[in-house]
Image: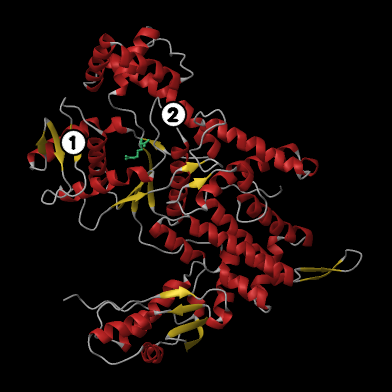
Amino acid sequence: KKEPRKRPSLITDINSVESNFCILEELKNIFEVAIGSAYPDLEDPPIIITLSGNNPKFGDYQCNSSMAIAQLLKAKNVKTNPREVANNILNKTPTSPLIEKIEVAGAGFLNIYLNKSLVEHVLNSIFRFGIKPPPVKRERVIVDFSSPNIAKEMHVGHLRSTIIGDSICRLLEFLEHDVLRINHLGDWGTQFGMLIAHLQDKFPNYKTHSPPISDLQAFYKESKKRFDEDEVFKKRAYACVVRLQSGDPDYIAAWKKICEVSRLEFQKIYDHLDIKIIDRGESFYQDRMVATVKYLKENGYLEEDEGRYIMWGNPDTHEGIPLTIVKSDGGYTYDTSDMATIRQRVEEEKGDRFIYVADAGQHTHFVTIEACAKRAGILKPHQKVENVVFGVVLGEDKKKFKTRSGDTIKLIDLIEEGLKRSLEKLVEKGRDKVLSPEELEKAQKAVAYGCIKYADLSHNRVNDYVFSFDKMLDDKGNTAVYLLYALTRIRSIARTAQISEEALLAEAKKTGFKLTHEAEWKLGKVLLRLPEVILKVANDLYLHSLCEYLYEISSAFTEFYDKCYCVEKDKDGKIVKIYYERLMLCEVTARLMEKCLDILGIKTVSKM
Ligand code: ARG
């Protein structure tokens, strides 16, 4: 039998609550205590707490455990119904400064109404002490993302991986995890044989003079053509692979040159998008692959199959597909390198979480890697391979994303078009007349990079998504442009009132926050949800929830700003009254939006 769970300790004093307080977590704790004492014999009863949605008559949050518990009791032949269960839970619910009241409703819902003074207190701490991450156990997280292939094109799939992966890292870094950002470059393998052989022919003095390969893709195509058509060249290419993998300095030098050229191209994309990542390609694992193969062989995990060595995740059922660990010619594969990789990440990096941001097409590969790594004892039973999958990028015709002439789109061209379109949009709105050239350029970049990132992140990543500059540059709806404008507008409210942050702070210390108007109260409750959204996304890695939350903040703010004056002016435009608390609410709103945008990797501007 399991040990009885420790009772969570509950908040008893509002003043002990800090700016990073997570309401949802506390409610879960409260109801864990309540349900535990109402039904002490139930093992692991479900604690289901959700937001109540838009209708205020259902309260702010709900506890929906009663229906599930009634089912569990019925299975034990206890006669009851969800409403009765709800009432029993309610009777055992400890009082909390978090909760104003709880009502039993409908089929057995418990509607929870938040206590306004708690919300006011937390807003006040955010205002005075800033946004802090909710506390979590610190973990070492390895995030494998972007990961294009040397000498091949970095395509829109890699762009998605780059954007999603960077945002996941930012979120985990905000939570103060120890994050290792890895670029698992495809920089090893048989294609380097033909590339090196071709390099030797075309640029014989490559060791002393950097080869002027500007178009590596064309270089790749040329060498591939020779490889396919010329038997002698093909043999030489194979010989080159052998020399390279045995570490021959001349061949390593040639390989390095080719990698450098590619890497410079990738860096241009990373510079535009402000991506920090550490290069650690497949080549890094060469020795480790040798060691891993030896380990797998010696421990009897490999089976011979027509001259190859394969490994099944489950040797009894032979379910799914096996990994090819050693090819019949003795070479290693993508599977071999990922087995060596996971082993390195567990044993050398001492990782707690292993995240791979790669397109949905590779999901089976990662499922098999996980199964084999578990079987071989590399991963412990509680550890997993988290494959953050995403769908493909489509053009506006809902077909594969291509240029008008049918070519694949170069990422750099795509980004440049974004910059051009973003500038056009700003000029169309006459912003070039109000902003200085520097401000205009800043806005142009924020909008261009922001819109490309946000369009990707705001959709559920598992779905395919349609890439459309028209849609992403729309200033209405859930887009980066709309949000960036909304933010500058909020920032300008305090500016027009000419109240400094210090003056506001002094005011906050004097009066604290009071949420009087209905729209203030509504906005205030939305603003307190950052910790719960962050914790959810840190767990499921679906960033669109964060985007939805950001949009919700901005909608609640718009409603508030429509209904509540922050500054009252007379007919000559002279300020007659300043609502300090509302300006503080503006400040907290702006800071939260900035934080969310920062996690999404989107730069904000003070003017646009
Ligand atoms: N280079 C691969 C590609 O372009 C992605 C690598 C993903 N990471 C990994 N450890 N397999 O599809």
Category of crowding for the residue at label 2, using alpha-carbon neighbours closer than 10 angstroms: few (below 14), some (14–19), many (at least 20): some
**Helix or strand or loop: what does disc 1 sit on?**
strand
Kindly report the distance in space between the C-alpha atoms of the residues bearing marks 2 and 1: 26 Å
- Horizontal relation, residue 441 to residue 196: left or right: right
The residue shown at (35%, 12%) is 198
* Amino acid identity at mark 1: Ile
The residue shown at (37%, 83%) is 66
Q: Is residue 259 above or below residue 556?
A: above
Which label number is shown at residue 165?
none
Residue 252: x %, y % from top left:
30, 19
Q: Are marks 2 and 1 in contact (CB under 8 Å)?
A: no
Q: Is mark 2 within 8 Å of ligand 1?
A: no
- Horizontal relation, residue 75 to residue 605: left or right: left
**Helix or strand or loop: what does disc 2 sit on?**
loop
Near-viewer residue (224 or 2): 224
Residue 65: x %, y % from top left:
37, 80
Q: Which residue is mark 1?
A: 325
* Amino acid identity at mark 2: Glu
Q: Which residue is mark 2?
A: 153
Q: Is residue 102 above or below residue 469?
A: below
Q: Upstream in the sequence, badge 2 or badge 1?
A: 2
Occupied quadrant, residue 95: bottom left
Whether residue 441 appears in this view of the structure is no
Whether residue 283 appears in this view of the structure is yes
Residue 511: x %, y % from top left:
67, 76
- Horizontal relation, residue 397 to residue 574: left or right: left
Residue 504: x %, y % from top left:
69, 66
Q: Is residue 308 above or below residue 2?
A: above
Occupied quadrant, residue 130: bottom right
User: What quarter of the picture does the N terminus occupy?
Assistant: bottom left
Category of crowding for the residue at label 1, using alpha-carbon neighbours closer than 10 angstroms: few (below 14), some (14–19), many (at least 20): many
